[in-house]
Image: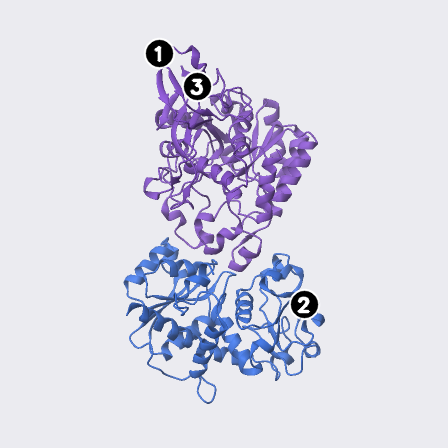
Chain colours: A purple, B blue
Amino acid sequence: MSLLIEHIKIHSPGGPLNNQTAIGIDQGLFVDPNRLQSPDRLDGKGQRLIPGLIDLRAHLREPGLEHKGTIGSETLAAVRGGITTVLAMPNTDPVIDSPAAVRLVLERAEKIGFCRVLPTAMLTLGGKGLQLSEMAALVDAGCVVLAQGSRPFGSQKIEYHALKYAKSLGVTVILDPEAPDFAGGCAHAGYVGTGLGLPLNSPLSEVLGLGTDLELIEATGVRAHLSRLTTATAVDRIREAKARGLPISCDVSLAHLLYTETALVNLDPVFHLERPLRTEADRKALINGLIDGTIDAIVTDHTPHESGAKLAPFPETETGMSIIEATLNLLLTLDQNDELPFDISLQAMTGNPAKLFQKPGFGQIAFGLSADCVLYDSTKPTHIDSSHWISAGHNSPIFGQELPGTITGVWVAGKQVQN
Amino acid sequence: MHGPAALQLTSEGRLKHLLTTEGLSKALITELLNTAESFLSSQGQPVKKAPLLRGKTVVNLFFENSTRTRTTFDIAAHRLSADVVTLDIRTSSASKGETLFDTLKNLEAMQADLFVVRHSAGGAPFFIANRVTPNIAVINAGDGTHAHPTQALLDLMTIRKHKGDPANLSVAIVGDVKHSRVARSLIHGLRGMKCPDIRAIGPGTLLPGDLDHLGVRAFHRIDHGLAGVDVIVLLRLQKERMTSALLPSEREFFNLYGMTEDRLKYSRPGAIVMHPGPINRGVEISNEVADGPQAVILDQVTNGIAVRMAVMAMTISTQQDLVS
């Protein structure tokens, strides 16, 4: 059955249908509304239609960590946040490092998922950083990129070999810059963490790790995506590396755009993240990196936990935040606060991440592309209420807040999954 | 105020827990110190028995080992006539996989009135105070590198007794400020008492990077740092600072920063020398200074009992008033 969504404003900057007022959906694709024959009609009542968001980093927790979340619960949460495509991180239990595990994720997503799930797998066996995984078989099984899931390589030489092998197969890799020597700590090494007596993490951990990654990317020529930058220095290094022509892209997490080290003053474990929140100057540099194009993508780094994981003194809690469910609202918040224009954040969660998969097919509203889109009322705020939270992880900092925008419809491949 | 500093006060600004010295007003610290002094006899020793906490149960929760602090809390509670239970958690429930939260709920069910908590994780006493049923007081006996507020209060009591109001004094803290909860709490306490000149002396590897933010001046040379100070606070140097390559050797530390009679001359005549103990002779301090007339280290220990009595009495009294 075909569908005509009319009386809308299409917001797909740079796309051929930007500012159009109607769109057709037929057989899973966007089509010219004039060519539909007796479609169902949906009156958009002046709302905005944007391409479905793409999240390059989320933890869906299956297999093995179902007490923290399932592909069912977390993809529905994603859809409620306006996300239609999720790149699932491989640090599950066991980790995703075999074709069977990749297929399991795909099958579970097919069966109980609400949005498109793209599996990633470990570059090394067991994610242990010692032996290469069967990269070709993993890609055959359906992996779009390979990652190391923020686990360290056993040595720089092993990382070099992993990247070189990936390059020879034409595989894109995701790296999480961190120097193992400087890793650890649960707070940025600044005045807040020092004052609270928390184990500290120096910006050097990221900057030194990034230095190694960039050298090895240059040496191997692998296409690499550097995930979750947190420091101003890293943004500078990426800018220089891109100017040198390195085949790289990078992302920043929503939390690092929204919060700084001062969020820790109440020792709320919700702000205990794998990469610590840093200074206001770092946050500003990350935002400017998005604006000037140095940073390509925004990720949710959605990490749902059971309540017990955060029920301990701050340094002893597990890391990560459950945030995917409010993604669009938070992008609109950054826009409303005059910090990050929505056109830029939208591009960073649609067109730019789509490029990583080297198969354009979504990330834009255009005839012939997969009908992944989100209809929302920009004039109506959403009250974030924990009792209506779908994600299994209630480790979220935004309960009780009123955030801009209300999503009224989400379509994945032409199928409405949320209304 | 946020976090521990906010949680420990009632809306009227009374002390219901003691988690940190950060944010304590001069009036409140003075009240605490006056109460502590009232527990000292005319000979300067803590009174042997007072009935203030009769029928109350104090639970010492030590997740990290400690002899001195635990003993002085024990003595303080006994002198206030409280029943005291001491749990060495390292050898009990925690090693059986019980979480801190569950341990806490169990102790709560046993009708404790006050928890004294020492823990290796910064913020653990705050976590406990945040989670316990109202009307149980929590006293931080040292958490990670965060805070050791009763130590800071006994230091302030000692300073006030020997040198007067900290608002007129220069205080230098020497050694491993970076890893010291004692130093952090003393700095906050001195700031609360409006001390105008707080200095930290040590090599770059042992000083935190953001002392400015704490209102502290950093010195790498001890002769510059000690010039004209009234109070010298030495910190204990842990052996692991050498194995983690922050310092070459104890000998080099002593040569650069050890408190000797010669170095004492840089300070103002009559300056006092303090140390939270236990001292390492020949590392932080020479025998001559340790046993000399300017050292007030044993006086600190005595004051520690009185201060802990005062903190227990005050927090329990606030909690009682909150109930009624």
Looking at the image, residue B243 lies above or below residue A71 = below
Find disc 1 in the rendering and name its residue. A38
> Which chain does the numbered disc 3 sit on?
A
Residue A112 seen:
yes
> Label 3 is placed on what type of residue?
Ile
Residue B183 place in picture, x, y as percent: 56, 67
- The residue located at (44%, 17%) in the rendering is A29
Looking at the image, residue A394 lies above or below residue A36 = below
- The residue located at (38%, 26%) in the rendering is A45
The reply to the same-chain question for discs 2 and 1 is no
Residue A111, numbered label: none
Of helix, strand and loop, which one carries label 1? loop
Find disc 3 in the rendering and name its residue. A23
Q: Residue furthest bottom?
A: B42
> Label 2 is placed on what type of residue?
Arg
N-terminal of the pair, mark 1 or mark 3, is: 3
Badge 2, how many Cα within 10 Å: few under 14, some, many 20+? some
> Which chain does the numbered disc 2 sit on?
B
Quadrant housing the C terminus of chain B = bottom left
CB atoms at circles 1 and 3 under 8 Å apart? Answer: no
Q: Nearer the viewer, mark 2 or mark 1?
A: 1
> Label 1 is placed on what type of residue?
Ser
Looking at the image, residue A156 lies above or below residue A103 = below
To which quarter of the image does residue A49 belong? Answer: top left
Find disc 2 in the rendering and name its residue. B251
Looking at the picture, tell me which residue is in the foreground, A10 or B22. Answer: A10
> Which chain does the numbered disc 1 sit on?
A
Looking at the picture, tell me which residue is in the foreground, B56 or B31. Answer: B31
